[in-house]
Amino acid sequence: MNKRNGVLFLLILVFALPLVGGAFLYHYHTYFHFKTLNHGVLLETPLNGRYLYSERAPKNWHVIYIVNNCASRCTETYHELQQVKKALGKESARVDILLLTNDDYAAKIRRLSKTLNTSSVQDKIYLADPLGNIFMYYRSSTDPMNILKDLKRVLEVSQIG
Protein backbone atom coordinates (compact mmCIF):
# COMPACT_ATOMS: atom_id res chain seq x y z
CA MET A 1 0.00 0.00 0.00
CA ASN A 2 2.91 2.35 0.73
CA LYS A 3 4.36 1.99 -2.78
CA ARG A 4 0.93 2.64 -4.28
CA ASN A 5 0.56 5.87 -2.31
CA GLY A 6 3.99 6.99 -3.51
CA VAL A 7 3.05 6.40 -7.16
CA LEU A 8 -0.26 8.21 -6.67
CA PHE A 9 1.53 11.12 -5.02
CA LEU A 10 4.03 11.35 -7.92
CA LEU A 11 1.21 11.21 -10.47
CA ILE A 12 -0.68 14.03 -8.75
CA LEU A 13 2.53 16.04 -8.45
CA VAL A 14 3.35 15.63 -12.15
CA PHE A 15 -0.05 17.01 -13.17
CA ALA A 16 -0.53 19.59 -10.41
CA LEU A 17 2.91 21.20 -10.44
CA PRO A 18 2.55 22.78 -13.93
CA LEU A 19 -0.87 24.15 -12.98
CA VAL A 20 0.40 25.65 -9.75
CA GLY A 21 3.50 27.00 -11.50
CA GLY A 22 1.45 28.52 -14.31
CA ALA A 23 -0.97 30.17 -11.88
CA PHE A 24 1.95 31.54 -9.89
CA LEU A 25 3.62 33.02 -12.98
CA TYR A 26 0.30 34.44 -14.19
CA HIS A 27 -0.41 36.28 -10.93
CA TYR A 28 3.16 37.37 -10.17
CA HIS A 29 4.51 38.01 -13.70
CA THR A 30 5.48 41.59 -12.86
CA TYR A 31 8.21 40.33 -10.51
CA PHE A 32 9.98 38.44 -13.27
CA HIS A 33 11.93 40.25 -15.98
CA PHE A 34 12.34 37.89 -18.88
CA LYS A 35 14.74 38.84 -21.65
CA THR A 36 13.06 40.05 -24.82
CA LEU A 37 14.48 39.97 -28.33
CA ASN A 38 13.64 43.54 -29.31
CA HIS A 39 16.09 46.42 -28.98
CA GLY A 40 13.55 49.22 -29.32
CA VAL A 41 10.76 50.21 -26.97
CA LEU A 42 7.52 48.38 -27.73
CA LEU A 43 4.36 50.44 -27.40
CA GLU A 44 1.77 48.77 -25.20
CA THR A 45 -0.93 49.40 -27.77
CA PRO A 46 -0.02 50.05 -31.40
CA LEU A 47 -1.05 53.46 -32.69
CA ASN A 48 -2.61 54.24 -36.03
CA GLY A 49 0.07 56.24 -37.82
CA ARG A 50 -1.26 56.01 -41.36
CA TYR A 51 -1.85 59.79 -41.44
CA LEU A 52 1.91 60.36 -41.13
CA TYR A 53 2.68 58.82 -44.51
CA SER A 54 -0.60 58.43 -46.38
CA GLU A 55 1.01 59.48 -49.67
CA ARG A 56 3.62 56.69 -49.49
CA ALA A 57 3.41 53.03 -50.47
CA PRO A 58 0.68 51.57 -48.25
CA LYS A 59 1.89 47.96 -48.45
CA ASN A 60 5.38 48.59 -47.06
CA TRP A 61 6.86 48.67 -43.60
CA HIS A 62 7.95 52.17 -42.59
CA VAL A 63 10.85 53.47 -40.57
CA ILE A 64 9.78 56.99 -39.59
CA TYR A 65 12.43 59.39 -38.34
CA ILE A 66 10.94 62.51 -36.71
CA VAL A 67 13.18 65.52 -36.01
CA ASN A 68 12.65 69.16 -35.12
CA ASN A 69 14.94 70.54 -37.80
CA CYS A 70 17.38 68.63 -39.90
CA ALA A 71 20.97 69.52 -39.00
CA SER A 72 24.16 67.52 -39.53
CA ARG A 73 23.25 64.85 -36.95
CA CYS A 74 19.89 64.38 -38.64
CA THR A 75 21.40 63.80 -42.07
CA GLU A 76 23.90 61.38 -40.55
CA THR A 77 21.14 59.39 -38.85
CA TYR A 78 19.05 59.41 -42.03
CA HIS A 79 22.04 58.10 -43.97
CA GLU A 80 22.50 55.33 -41.37
CA LEU A 81 18.83 54.39 -41.79
CA GLN A 82 19.33 54.20 -45.55
CA GLN A 83 22.27 51.86 -44.91
CA VAL A 84 20.05 49.73 -42.66
CA LYS A 85 17.60 49.45 -45.55
CA LYS A 86 20.38 48.38 -47.92
CA ALA A 87 21.61 45.83 -45.38
CA LEU A 88 18.20 44.13 -45.54
CA GLY A 89 19.13 42.84 -49.00
CA LYS A 90 16.19 41.49 -50.98
CA GLU A 91 13.85 42.45 -48.14
CA SER A 92 14.70 46.15 -48.62
CA ALA A 93 11.86 46.53 -51.14
CA ARG A 94 9.44 45.94 -48.27
CA VAL A 95 10.70 48.93 -46.24
CA ASP A 96 10.43 52.70 -46.71
CA ILE A 97 12.50 55.23 -44.77
CA LEU A 98 10.69 58.50 -43.99
CA LEU A 99 12.15 61.72 -42.62
CA LEU A 100 9.54 63.99 -41.05
CA THR A 101 10.64 67.44 -39.91
CA ASN A 102 8.68 69.81 -37.73
CA ASP A 103 8.87 72.42 -40.49
CA ASP A 104 6.93 70.30 -42.99
CA TYR A 105 4.77 68.05 -40.80
CA ALA A 106 4.12 70.13 -37.65
CA ALA A 107 0.38 69.35 -37.45
CA LYS A 108 0.91 65.60 -37.96
CA ILE A 109 3.70 65.52 -35.37
CA ARG A 110 1.50 67.36 -32.84
CA ARG A 111 -1.25 64.81 -33.47
CA LEU A 112 1.18 61.94 -32.82
CA SER A 113 2.36 63.67 -29.65
CA LYS A 114 -1.22 63.90 -28.37
CA THR A 115 -1.92 60.28 -29.27
CA LEU A 116 1.20 59.09 -27.42
CA ASN A 117 0.46 61.40 -24.47
CA THR A 118 3.99 62.73 -24.50
CA SER A 119 5.57 66.06 -25.25
CA SER A 120 8.60 64.64 -27.03
CA VAL A 121 8.02 62.54 -30.12
CA GLN A 122 10.91 64.19 -31.91
CA ASP A 123 14.41 62.83 -32.33
CA LYS A 124 12.95 59.35 -32.33
CA ILE A 125 12.71 56.60 -34.93
CA TYR A 126 9.38 54.78 -35.19
CA LEU A 127 8.54 51.47 -36.85
CA ALA A 128 5.16 51.08 -38.54
CA ASP A 129 3.67 47.99 -40.14
CA PRO A 130 1.92 47.92 -43.55
CA LEU A 131 -1.44 48.36 -41.82
CA GLY A 132 -0.29 51.72 -40.44
CA ASN A 133 0.28 50.64 -36.83
CA ILE A 134 3.21 52.27 -35.07
CA PHE A 135 4.40 49.60 -32.66
CA MET A 136 7.99 50.41 -31.65
CA TYR A 137 10.34 53.35 -31.30
CA TYR A 138 14.03 54.08 -30.78
CA ARG A 139 15.96 57.13 -29.67
CA SER A 140 17.82 58.73 -32.57
CA SER A 141 21.12 57.85 -30.88
CA THR A 142 20.34 54.11 -31.07
CA ASP A 143 22.89 51.89 -32.78
CA PRO A 144 21.62 51.24 -36.34
CA MET A 145 22.58 47.57 -35.98
CA ASN A 146 19.90 47.20 -33.31
CA ILE A 147 17.30 48.65 -35.67
CA LEU A 148 18.52 46.29 -38.39
CA LYS A 149 18.20 43.26 -36.09
CA ASP A 150 14.65 44.22 -35.13
CA LEU A 151 13.66 44.90 -38.73
CA LYS A 152 15.05 41.56 -39.89
CA ARG A 153 13.17 39.78 -37.13
CA VAL A 154 9.90 41.58 -37.88
CA LEU A 155 10.14 40.99 -41.62
CA GLU A 156 11.00 37.34 -41.05
CA VAL A 157 8.00 36.55 -38.86
CA SER A 158 5.52 38.88 -40.54
CA GLN A 159 2.58 37.55 -42.50
CA ILE A 160 1.73 41.02 -43.88
CA GLY A 161 3.61 43.30 -46.24
Image (spheres, grey):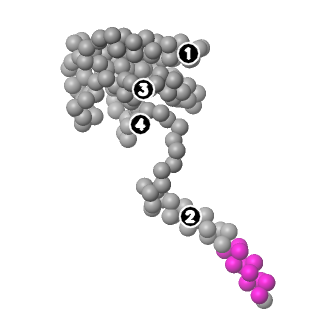
| Percent x, y of residue 18 | 61, 64
Amino acid at the residue labelled 4:
Leu
Amino acid at the residue labelled 1:
Ala
Query: Is-magenta flag for residue 11?
Result: yes
Query: At numbered mark 2, what does the secondary structure look like: helix, strand or loop?
Result: helix
Query: Is-magenta flag for residue 13?
Result: no
Query: At numbered mark 3, what does the secondary structure look like: helix, strand or loop?
Result: loop
C-alpha separation, residue under disc 4 versus residue under disc 3: 14 Å
Task: Name the side, left or right, on which 10 lies relative to 117.
Answer: right
C-alpha separation, residue under disc 3 versus residue under disc 1: 17 Å
| Percent x, y of residue 131 | 42, 26
C-alpha separation, residue under disc 2 versus residue under disc 1: 43 Å
Amino acid at the residue labelled 2:
Gly
- Which residue corresponds to mark 4? 42
**What quarter of the picture does the N terminus occupy?**
bottom right
- Main secondary structure of the magenta stretch: helix
Residue at point 39% right, 30% down? 137
Closer mark to the observer between disc 3 and disc 2: 3
Mark 3 neighbour class, 10 Å CA radius: few under 14, some 14 to 19, many 20 or more: some
2 or 1: tag closer to the N-terminus = 2
